[in-house]
Image (cartoon, helix red, strand yellow):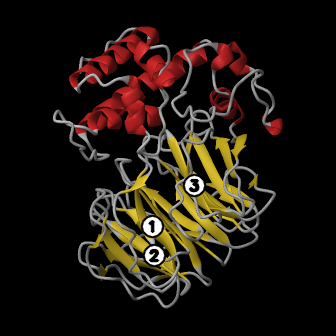
Amino acid sequence: MAEPSHGTYDEQLRAFAEDLRKLRIDHGNPTLAEVARRSSKGSRNLSVAALSEALAGKRLPRLDFLVAFLRALLSVDEAGHPVAVQGSSPVLTEWRARWRNLEHLRQQTSRAAAPAADNPTSAEGHGEVEGEEHAVPPGELAAGPQEPSAERISGLQILVAAHARRAALDGRPVPLPALAGHPGGTWGLAFSPDGLALATGGADKTVQLWDTATGDPLGAPLAEHSGGVLGLAFSPDGALLATCGQDQTVRIWDPEAGHLTTPPLTAHQGAVLAVAFSPGGDLLASACADGTVRLWNPATGHPAGRTLTEHDGEVHAVAFSSADGPRGTLLATAGDDRTVRIWDPATGQRVGGLPIEHTDAVWGVSFSPDGHVLASAAGDRSTRTWDPLTGRPAGPPLVKHTNAVWAVAFSPDGRVLATGSADRTVRLWDAATGESLGPPLTEPDGRVLDVAFSPDGSLLAASGEDGTVRLWALPHLA
C-alpha cells in the first residue's frame, strides 16, 4: 500500500480510493458484481453502485463497508479457493488505521465548513439539521459520510462538535439526541476502543452496533442470543466483542463481520451477568448468577484457569485493572454477598486483605486507568473508592443517589467518575475529592442500568429501562 499523503482531505480521499483500486487488481480484479456476491455471504450486503462510488473516491465509505469490501477481496485465494479472514488480519488492521486517520481529517474539514455548528438547535429539543438524512437506505449499508459540506454533515456530528464547545464554556454536560436502543430495556453498553462504535444489548435478545459519528445503526442487529443481553465488552484491539445474557451463554463476535468467532461458551448454570477482557486481550472473565466467575481464552472459547467460586450468591460485575497497576493486572468481582473480591487472574488466587464490603449487593465495579483505585457501586445507594490491595477506602463515599447505584465508570483520564442509579439519574463526581460535579443528569423514563465514557472522554453514554441510550457531550475533556 502506498504511503498516505499529507494533503487536503480531497487529496487523501483520492489516494485512498486509488489504493483500493490497486488492491482489487492485486487480488484478481474481480468484477464489482462478484465482490457484491461474496459480501452477501457475510453480514454486509454491498451494492455495485456503492462499491463504484467508493472506488471512484466520491465519498469516504463507512468503516463497516470498507471492512466488508476488504473481506470480500481477501476471501478467495489466487486459485479461487475460499480463505477465512480473521479480524486481526494485518491487511484489515492497516486499512482500519488509515480509515481512522482519514475520517478524523474529514470531521475536521466538515466542522470548518459548517458555520451553523456554533448555533445548533437547542439540545433540549434534540433539533436536527434541516434536510439532513439520518437513516441509511435499505440495502445501502455502504453509504457512508458524504464529501464534506455543511448540508451533508450528520446532525449528531454537528451537535457533538458544537455542544462540546458549549460544554467547555458552560462547564457542564450537554445532552445530545438519544439512540433508540432496545424495546423493553437497554441493559448494557460498551464503546469500541477507537470510539467509532457503541455496542448495546437489551431485553429484545439482540446486540446493536451504532455509528458514534452519526447515531445510525451499523448493520443489522446481532441476534444469536435466546434471552436478554445483559453485558458487553470489546477486546482491547476492538477485533472481538463479547456478549452475555439470560440464556446462560457468553458469545464472542467479530463485530465488523457480524458473526461468532467461537461456539457459544456454555459452562455457566445461570444467567451470565457481566463480561470483561484483560488489558492484553488474552483473557475473558464472565460473572454469573450461579455464583461463579469463569476465565476463558477468547481466541478459542476454551476455559483458561480455575473457576472462581468464593462469592455467596450472584456475581454481578467483573473488571480487570491495567497491567501498570501496583501488582500488575488484577481482577475485581462483586455480587449479592455485598462484597468485592480481588484476584490474581494468572493464578486464580485471591489477593489483598479481607473482601471489600458494602451494606447491600454490589452491582458495579471499575478500576481507575492506572489500576491504583477501585470504585464500587451498590444497592446501599453509595459508590465507594478503595485501594484494591489493602481494601482501605481511597476517599469518602459518594452518597447523593436516593436509590440503588447500578453502574460506575472512570473517565479515561481517571479524573471523573460516572454513576447510574435506580433513582433515574446519572451523576458525575470528582474522583480525587468525591465531590459531586454539578446537578444530576436525569433519565426520566426509568432506572439507569449502565454508563460508559467514550475512549477520548468527550461523550458519556447511559442505558436505561426505557430502552433508550442517552448521550452527553462532556466539558472536562472537550
Against 37, residue 293 (above or below) is: below
Against 474, residue 252 (above or below) is: below
Mark 2 crowdedness (10 Å alpha carbons): few <14, some 14-19, many ≥20: many
Q: Say whether disc 1 or disc 3 marks the residue closer to the N-terminus.
A: 3
Residue at (50% x, 19% y) in the render = 106
**Residue 442 image position (x, y, % from top left):** 77, 54
**Disc 3: which residue:** 200
**Residue 127 image position (x, y, % from top left):** 79, 31
| Left or right relative to 115: residue 49 | left
Element type at marker 2?
strand
Q: Where does the N terminus fall, quadrant-wise? A: top left
Against 391, residue 165 (above or below) is: above
The residue positioned farthest toward the left in the image shown: 79
Q: Say whether disc 2 or disc 1 marks the residue closer to the N-terminus.
A: 1
- The amino acid type, in three-letter code, at marker 1 is Val
Viewer-proximal residue among 414 and 81 = 81
Element type at marker 1?
strand
Label 3 close to label 2 by CB (< 8 Å) = no
Viewer-proximal residue among 5 and 203 = 203
For residue 233, the mark is: none
Identify the image quadrant of residue 135. top right
| Left or right relative to 150: residue 64 | left
For residue 287, the mark is: 2
Residue at (65% x, 63% y) in the render = 204
| Mark-to-mark CA distance, 1 and 3 | 13 Å
Label 2 close to label 1 by CB (< 8 Å) = yes
Residue 274 visible in rendering: yes
- The amino acid type, in three-letter code, at marker 2 is Ala
Viewer-proximal residue among 181 and 414 = 181
**Disc 1: which residue:** 275
**Residue 137 image position (x, y, % from top left):** 63, 31
Element type at marker 3?
strand
